[in-house]
Image: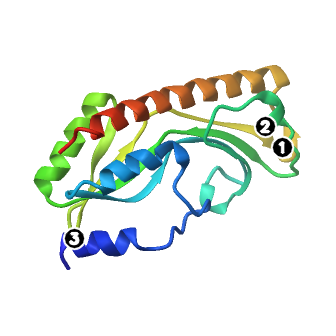
Amino acid sequence: MTFELDKKNILGKVDKSQKGKIDTGIKEICDLINNNKNYYTTSSCSGRIVLLEADSNKKNKAKWLFVSHESTDFESISKKLDSKSEVWLRQEGAILHICCKDLESAEKLINLVKSIGFKRAGMISINKRFVVEIISSEHLCAPVIKKGKKIVTDEYFSVLISEANKKIRKNKEKLEHLKTNLETFK
């Protein structure tokens, strides 16, 4: 199968993410990548703040109590802290998976994103496709409820939310810088 046919097939598929569509905070970046003849995206997230209810902090086995791709406030998120289980507060940076036409295109993309400040960027597949993974390094993960008991004070929970918001803003600045660079990227 050719790169062009692969690209057409992947971009023509229905979005299977939990949200069912590309985050608005990363859509323009995905469009810029997908409009470039040498690249296409297979998955993306603009970054988020989440509360997960689970016996571990594994997202695939968790109930999502709260999700925001923007900064949030104490009132919005603290009202979701009602659980008889375990709850984790997580802030996650942006992530992109991008198929590249060839090794040269992959290397060029990796060099671009690293120059912007994305420290976690590299090849994750070279077998059938050249796939680059880009992950923003902003991250926070903290348990807030254990065995149904809140283990953080409101004051500390407020500090965690403030830190998560700072990281979300820094993540968005990097994404804006990436978008600007992709506008002239060949």
User: Which is more toward the observer, 82 or 1?
Assistant: 1
- Specify whether 148 is left or right of 15: right
Which mark is on residue 4? Answer: 3
Scheme of colours in the image:
rainbow
Q: Position of residue 115 (x, y in %)?
A: 25, 29
Instruction: Inspect this view and state whether residue 5 appears.
Output: yes
Q: Which residue type carries mark 3?
A: Glu
Determine which residue is flagged by label 2: 77
Q: Quadrant of the image for the N terminus?
A: bottom left
- Specify whether 25 is left or right of 90: left
The residue lying at 20 percent from left, 70 percent from top is: 3
Name the quadrant containing residue 143: top right
Q: CA distance from mark 2 to mark 1?
A: 6 Å
Q: Which residue type carries mark 1?
A: Lys
Pair 3/2: label in front: 3
Q: Residues within 10 Å of mark 1 (few under 14, many from 20)?
A: few
Q: Position of residue 22 (x, y in %)?
A: 51, 55
Q: Residues within 10 Å of mark 3 (few under 14, many from 20)?
A: few
Determine which residue is flagged by label 1: 80
Rendered position, 162 above or below 35: above
Q: Which residue type carries mark 2?
A: Ile
Q: Earlier in the sequence, mark 3 or mark 1?
A: 3
Q: How many marks?
A: 3
